[in-house]
Amino acid sequence: MKDTYKQTETKKGFRLTVGRGLILALIFTLASCDKLLDVDSQHIVNEENKWQNINDARASLMGIYGLLRSALAQDNAQWIYGDVRQGDFLASSRRDLQEAVSGNLTASYPLIENLSNWRKFFAVINAANLFIENSGKIVAVDQQYTALNQRIDVAQARALKGFCYFLMARIWGDVPIWDKAYEGTFPKVSQSPENAVLAYAEQELRAALNVLPFRYGSLTDEIYPIEFYHGSTFENWDGVLFNRISVNAILAHLMAWSGKYLESSVYSEYVLANAAKSVAGYVPIGNLTSAEGFFFTSTNSQLVAFPFKWSALEGSFDGHIEQLALAEPLVPRPIPEIYIPRDRIVSIFRETGDLRFTFNSVGIPVTSYFTDFQSERPIFSKIKVIRGGSTDGSFPMFSSAIVFSRLEDIALLRAEALAVLGEQELARGILGQLRKNRGLPEIAPSPDLLDEIFLERQRELMGEGHRWFDQVRYHKIKGDDAAFNTLITEKGIFWPVAAEVLAANPNLKQNPYWN
């Protein structure tokens, strides 16, 4: 399996900075299909001797984050699950990407098979369970590791596990639930139905909700006012660790996916009302699309994110939208692997004055989202973090963060929830403010408000992994597309389970839609 994190040797100039935790993350990721670890146990820290001091706690916790980052980056999963599948992008020449675009998810390609395999997510869950079960041992033997520190760390592990189950419920629907750690081989656990998986994810997230601080390593945090958290101040942790705002944002998404829009409105309102406590804010368009802006700089405005900090000597060739979407003149590739056709772009950005894409008075495109718009395949360059924010793409190593949620996303999610609940004016007000931030006027009273909210999500969150899941929610609400209704009722919205996974566990069943 391809290593997402390239060039770890310091002699090559790149290294991972969270130590043993991410080394363990890579071991999990590279393990065979039925073994949790297929390396000699002498080559890793023995579990009995691992939980000895605060450094072990830090490395193990960072390892969970590293595993989840790897799961989302590997095979460009974040974007193929969310943006490529039956979305706005087309594939230029790669047949495997075209099958993903078409929704032919049983096509015989390594990429499709890898993305059908959920074991990378269960590596995250197992690591989280190991931490939850064992980190308390350190409190008794290392005075530096306080009970409160451990409680906050466990809350992060539970939040990561809950988030992971939410992601898997959206991708596969029915998946096994592991509530304890396993060593050696994956357990032969049967799948639980999607609603049970979502309920378990909610349980884990809610358990973390009132424990986590707003900001780590900050003396002004009202929950955990401490200057150094695991040896670093907020400057190191902002945008890296799940905080109280992060968990509320995930719960807002989980509730919307479950159709529980009252609860979604509550969680999203909390995020909007308390974002300043974690120093999170809306992103100006110039910062959003800058090579040295939002996706380059780690910040708590990335409410839920997995950064590749160039300042920490992290970076990779793959696992970034840039690998799929950029081409000459930005990087040395003749055509992008995925692109949005010109007529599609114009139909999405249909209003004059949009700061993301518009035509000026003489018909020339003005855009911060695309490069070389007049070409046959316009380059989606909204996200273009090359190395340390360089404009020189001759060596295309990327360091953009994988951002699951930001404040604009949550505001639009709250508008969606309010529109479903019949709170039209409140929803219209939120949408109007976001449109104003992007150079657009408030919408007229006549258009369908829900349609306008989802259109704004399509424009604002393009290339951030939301499009497919937004379409599912939209069609669940509307219920007026017969073909999509069938896809929902027959569970065609989910991915098939990889043959490799089914072969390793006879208690598992294939999604009937894909039989």
Image (cartoon, rainbow, N blue to C red):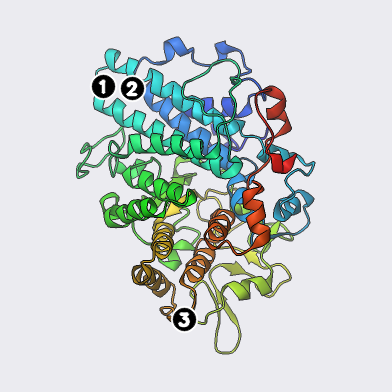
Which mark sits nearer the N-terminus, 1 or 2? 2
- Helix, strand or loop at disc 1? loop
Sequence-wise, which precedes: disc 3 or disc 1?
Answer: 1
- In this view, 169 is above or below 155: below
The front one of 501 and 366 is: 501
Q: Is residue 89 visible?
A: no
Mark 1 near mark 2, Cβ–Cβ under 8 Å?
Answer: yes
* Picture quarter with the N terminus: top right
Calculate the distance from the C-alpha at mark 3 to the C-alpha at mark 1: 61 Å
Q: Given this view, does label 3 or label 1 mark the residue nearer the observer?
A: 3
Residue 392 visible in this rendered orientation of the protein: yes
Q: Amino acid at mark 3?
A: Ser
> Residue tagged by mark 1?
144
Q: Badges 3 and 1: C-beta atoms under 8 Å apart?
A: no
Q: Position of residue 430 (x, y in %)?
A: 36, 68
Of the two numbered discs 2 and 3 in the rendering, the one whose residue sits closer to the viewer: 3
In the image, residue 189 lies at what x, y percent? 58, 23
Q: Amino acid at mark 1?
A: Gln
Q: Which residue is mark 2?
A: 54
The residue under label 3 is 446
